[in-house]
Image (cartoon, rainbow, N blue to C red):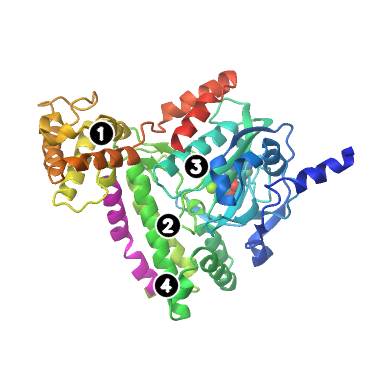
């Protein structure tokens, strides 16, 4: 083979380039995006490839080489067009009409073996018309943090985007919140869609109801396809879409709350029209059940603190009504949104009871247990994740025999007699266990283990992963942790 032939040969045998890419978004026309080119990087070191996602793309991980990832997702060879998506959004309550993909683009769309269409979106791939003076880049630590967040949330059952790859790119970046110069990366995020609430808000701002309708039809056709067969008139299809979006978002925020996750930047440009969680910047998992816990240091007024998340998501859904009014009846929008609290509370209750060991919350004391658990977690300020992981780790069928045995080998809970709330909690938990047969204790142990991983992605954990990378380029702790989540 001659040297001149090498690139072509590489591309045609690269399974990531020969995937059956679909042009769903591209075919909507150029009102929704700008064609861009990717940055060229001085270096490409593959730091993360998500083998767990490859079978969903119909690929055998063994047949995809590291070099294939670098060619496709670091050098961006062989794929065109690369589309920077246009959007606006409410950022911390203020409308911003200067947004859009400022450091990423839609690399391609691929149908998974599950029949769903997935976006490959980049983060850190260079400047676009929407970079607003930014460098278009992603720090390596930012990439590491997003990979970890997505995998941890996935493990916790949150409907989330995940990172397909992360490549270190050899640049020195300057950031106010990292010791600089800091290392750089480019990431591929695999998500249900990168169409945001803000994508619709931009069309309303531009007074283009025609483009709103076209995009909405595309969204329903692509991501809410089942509605096509469930409705009996055009009008119904749109009403059903919004009602389902409300449900998906309410359930998503309930998943975050149960997971003890604080997204940190719930601007409308970070809200997916598919109701999937994505874009992990300054996020944090709550150390304790602290309602005012705020993850982003620049969120001075605690707008997006832990306890505000359900209300903010509801507000964002309400703001979305403005553009959707061009197509959907206002009464339908209002009646759709009116179900938010009901959906949220049902999902939150359901998930918290699972964390407490009960797949099925059909017992009389379920709500009392939930309330008492939260009162205890809030009053004691004991570690939120540690409480549940200790329950899972120390669970013993003996807990069914005596209230005093409940969690008695855990070192983090109060000793018997030290906390009236916790003593009551033990009495109640013991009482509930007695509704079940002794031979059902195994199922409770399994449920506890399933919903409460032993490692939580708390900030000190992330730092303990980052330190060895920063100090000695040791990635093993990172791989070990991700492995635990997969
Ligand atoms: P985010 O807070 O990550 O959701 O980003 C908000 C907006 O800022 C989006 O339009 C991003 O594309 C843009 N942005 C964030 N960081 C950069 C950067 N380093 N360079 C260019 N644009 C950026
Ligand atoms: Mg964003």
- In-image side of 478 versus 27 (left or right): left
Nearer the observer, disc 1 or disc 2? 1
Q: Residues within 10 Å of mark 1 (few under 14, many from 20)?
A: many
**Mark pair 1, 2: CA separation:** 36 Å
**Mark pair 1, 4: CA separation:** 43 Å
Task: State the residue lying farthest toward the top.
Answer: 472
Mark 1, residue position: 391
Query: Horizontal and vertical percent for residue 283?
Result: 45, 39
Task: State the residue lying farthest toward the bottom.
Answer: 233
Tell me, yes or no, whether the two marked residues, 2 and 3, touch with CB atoms within 8 Å.
Answer: no
Mark 2, residue position: 316
Query: Horizontal and vertical percent for residue 209?
Result: 56, 72
Q: Quadrant of the N terminus?
A: top right
Provide the residue span drawn in magenta: 332-352
Residue at (12, 26) in percent of width and height: 416
User: Magenta segment: does it hold 334?
Assistant: yes
Tell me, yes or no, whether the two marked residues, 4 and 3, touch with CB atoms within 8 Å.
Answer: no
Mark 3, residue position: 280
Tell me, yes or no, whether the two marked residues, 1 and 4, touch with CB atoms within 8 Å.
Answer: no
- Residue 177 in view, yes or no: yes
- State the mark number for residue 239: 4
């Amino acid at each position: 083979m001659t040297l001149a032939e090498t690139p072509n040969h590489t591309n045609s045998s690269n399974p990531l380039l020969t995937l059956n890419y679909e042009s769903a978004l591209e075919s909507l026309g150029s009102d929704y995006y700008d064609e861009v080119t990717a940055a060229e990087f001085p270096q490409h070191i593959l730091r993360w490839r998500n083998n767990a996602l490859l079978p969903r793309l119909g690929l055998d991980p063994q047949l995809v080489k590291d070099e294939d990832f670098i060619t496709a997702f670091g050098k961006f060879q062989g794929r065109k067009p690369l589309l920077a998506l246009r959007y606006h959004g409410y950022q911390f309550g203020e409308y911003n009409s200067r947004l859009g993909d400022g450091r990423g683009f839609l690399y391609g769309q691929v149908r998974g073996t599950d029949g769903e269409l997935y976006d490959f979106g980049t983060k850190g791939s260079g400047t676009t018309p929407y970079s607003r003076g930014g460098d278009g880049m992603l720090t390596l630590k930012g990439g590491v943090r997003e990979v970890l967040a997505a995998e941890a949330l996935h493990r916790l059952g949150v409907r989330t985007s995940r990172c397909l790859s992360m490549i270190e790119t050899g640049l020195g970046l300057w950031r106010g919140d990292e010791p600089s110069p800091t290392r750089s990366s480019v990431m591929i995020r695999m998500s249900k869609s990168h169409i945001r609430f803000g994508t619709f808000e931009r069309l309303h701002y531009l007074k283009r109801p025609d483009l709103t309708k076209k995009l909405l039809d595309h969204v329903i056709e692509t991501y809410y396809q089942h509605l096509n067969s469930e409705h009996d008139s055009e009008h119904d299809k749109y009403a059903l879409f919004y009602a389902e979006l409300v449900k998906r978002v309410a359930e998503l925020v309930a998943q975050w709350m149960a997971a003890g996750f604080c997204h940190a930047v719930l601007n409308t440009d970070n809200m997916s029209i598919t109701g999937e969680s994505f874009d992990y910047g300054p996020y944090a998992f709550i150390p304790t059940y602290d309602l005012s816990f705020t993850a982003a240091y620049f969120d001075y007024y605690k707008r997006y603190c832990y306890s505000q998340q359900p209300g903010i998501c509801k507000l964002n859904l309400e703001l979305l009504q403005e553009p959707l009014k061009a197509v959907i009846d206002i009464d339908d929008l209002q009646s759709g949104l009116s179900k938010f609290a009901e959906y949220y509370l049902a999902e939150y209750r359901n998930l918290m009871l699972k964390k407490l060991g009960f797949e099925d919350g059909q017992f009389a004391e379920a709500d009392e247990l939930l309330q008492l658990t939260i009162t205890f977690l809030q009053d004691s300020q004991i570690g939120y994740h540690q409480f549940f992981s200790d329950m899972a780790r120390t669970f013993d069928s003996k807990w069914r025999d005596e209230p005093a045995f409940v969690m008695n080998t855990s070192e983090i809970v109060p000793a018997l007699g030290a906390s009236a709330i916790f003593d009551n909690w033990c009495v109640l938990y013991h009482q509930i266990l007695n509704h079940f047969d002794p031979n059902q204790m195994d199922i409770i142990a399994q449920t506890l283990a399933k919903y409460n991983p032993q490692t939580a992605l708390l900030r000190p954990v992330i730092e303990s992963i980052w330190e060895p990378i920063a100090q000695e380029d040791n990635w093993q702790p990172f791989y070990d942790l991700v492995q635990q989540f997969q």
